[in-house]
Image: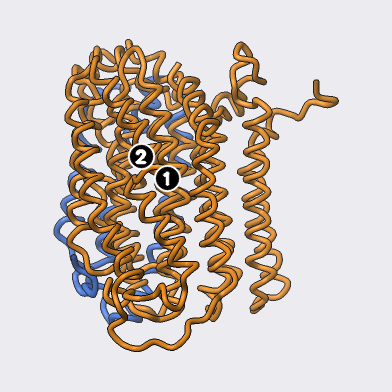
Amino acid sequence: MNVPIEYFVLLSMALFSIGLFGILTRRNALMFLMSVEIMVNAANINLIAFALYHGNLTGQVFALFVMALAAAEVAIGLGIILVLYRNFRDVDVTVPTTMRW
Amino acid sequence: MAVFELPDWAALAPALILVATALALFVIDSINPHTKNRSLLAGTTAVGSLAALGVAVWFMVAGVGTPTAAGGRGVVELFGGQLVVDQMALFFMTVVSVVTALVAVASYDYMGDHAYQAEYYSLMMLAATGMATMAAANSLVTIFIALELASLPSYALVSILKDNRGSVEGGLKYFLIGALSSAIFVYGISLVYGATGHLQLEAIADNLQGAGEYGGLLGLGILMLIGGFAFKTASVPFHFWAPDAYEGAPAPVAAFLSSASKAAGFVIAFRVFTTAFPLEPTTAVIGVDWTLAFIILAIVTMTLGNFAAATQDNVKRMLAYSSIGHAGYALIGLAGLSADGGEIVMGAAMMHLLVYGFMNTGAFLFVALAEYWGVGRTFEDYNGLSNQAPVACFALGIFMFSLAGIPPLGGFWSKYFLFTGAIQAATANSAMLIVAAALVVNSAISLYYYARLVKAVWIEDPVSGRDTLAQPTGLYAAIIFAAVLTVVALPVFGPIADAALEAATVAIS
């Protein structure tokens, strides 16, 4: 392996920041979900790169678990977005504001 | 002593019973998909969680999880140290199962006309399984999986009233912030893995020294882990889902989330920070003492929670903010740790979470009762309820005064231990004096809004005439049981305190 580990961390941090930017700026719940996925995948890149760097498989195995959990999370999220659409006729996350402090 | 020895995996019995109950509910549902047999479903749930409770208490008394040197049967490590059953794990399994049992009994009436009965109860048992597993998780892998197992059913539970806008909105907000915080959490795990090369907590602690050149990565990773814990425990900076999710959710679900889920969030925080990041070596690597983060979070969380609660008109929302305030009290357990001790603060935080499990569940169940009656949601709507329902209102008085920390109720004693622990920790870290002062000031503020609710139900006259109110068996039974537990916590507080202190000592050493 010739690519230094720092580049992987920079890549994953860039992806993480892109995801975070998306969450902070998007109003569509589906885009929000995609941004979260980007952040989780940034963590996966880290895990796999560090697994290679440290020479153990822990990180790779955990990355598989993380992918499965992210899929489960999206399934629940889509369900909630579906009932959101049924109730509010929109998937804009700024529309449901019946509760404010 | 024992005629036969149970295998090691049997130490996980409380969590296994909870998951078996969830599967039993699925079987009932698949045999009769549209069953509305509430007695069967709620009964199965309650029996399962009471069985888990019984086994957890039995194990604690029998000495499972106490080190052999101290006369116990030893801490049980399973699957290469991925799960560990010690006193702290059993203690929090007890908290989770007792809250689950109370909520299941209360849901019998509250969710009476809901179309998806079996789904509701099995989601609740799955979430309880996740919380019990969180108590035993001893590796960042198992912690993350257990955390998601507890979170995912919770999102669905909050938004289970599909045609209720508040429920869906609460569920959406809970889900969005939960997804964001779990992404931050898993990124933090990846950074900790990068710095140390391990995910098992003891292995992380052993490899902290080698992480010297990656101190920055490790520090950032720890900060992101704190973000994940803050979400689960509803403390600053990821607290803002709590008021909306609790207000929108069915009240028994709000009781479940604010008591059991919060306790489970604290147990993983306790375990990660005592096992994986011992204070001295971690400070040497990252250059900052992590208790500083918890001192700030504890003060900000309890102050914000209490001040926001004092301004609410909606009872459920007031309880939600008070639940944030109590998360701040429990955070003292981590803020007060020092290199040479901290058992008292951590033990006190565990006691507080146990007592809080009774009194807060009871308070939310009273709100469930009020919603069942349909009297309304604000303090004024609660005026004069004691005329129609004196027993429930008496129980409410117990919950409120215990939450406020009035002697001699259980809530006073756990706060008292937190206070003495914080004062004692102040010898090592003088910032703890500010925390102790914040605890006292906030408790005094909290008396205002708790007493306001008691005044509304007992002293004020109802705004409008009210018909006689029904007495739903399940809700009443759960509320009275919670009140009895809150009161009984007083004479048995000695053993509870001993158990919590012992568990904290085992966890810290």
Q: Provide the secondary structure element on which disc 1 rests.
A: loop
Image coordinates of residue B476 in percent, x first then y, are: 54, 68
- Image quadrant containing the C terminus of chain B: top left
**Residue B27 lies in what quarter of the image?**
bottom right
* Left or right: where A73 falls relative to B49: left
Vertical placement of residue B199 versus B378, above or below? above
Q: Is residue B136 visible?
A: yes
Q: Quadrant of the N terminus of chain B?
A: top right
The residue lying toward the viewer, choosing from A32 and B142, is B142
Q: Are marks 1 and 2 on the same chain?
A: no
Closest to the camera, between mark 1 and mark 2, is: 1
User: Which residue is depicted at the point 30% across and 18% down?
Assistant: B338
Q: Which numbered dot is residue B409?
A: 1
What x and y, as percent, mark residue B462? Answer: 31, 81
Residue at figure coordinates x 51%, y 62% from the top left = B479
What separation in Å lies between label 1 and label 2 (alpha carbons)? Answer: 48 Å
Q: Which chain is blue?
A: A
The disc at residue B7 is: none
Query: From what the image shows, is residue B216 above or below residue B25?
Result: above
Q: Is residue B370 above or below residue A36?
A: below
Q: How many tags in the picture? A: 2
The residue tagged 2 is: A44
Amino acid type, mark 1: Leu
Q: Mark 2 — on which chain does it sit?
A: A
Residue B230 position within the rendered picture, expressed as x and y whole percent measured from the top left = 30, 43
Judge from the rendering whether residue B441 lies leftward or rightward of residue B251; answer left or right. left
Q: Is residue A3 visible?
A: no
Q: What amino acid is found at the position of numbered circle 2 in the picture?
A: Asn
Chain of the residue where label 1 is placed in the rendered structure: B
x and y, in percent, of residue B200 in the image: 46, 25
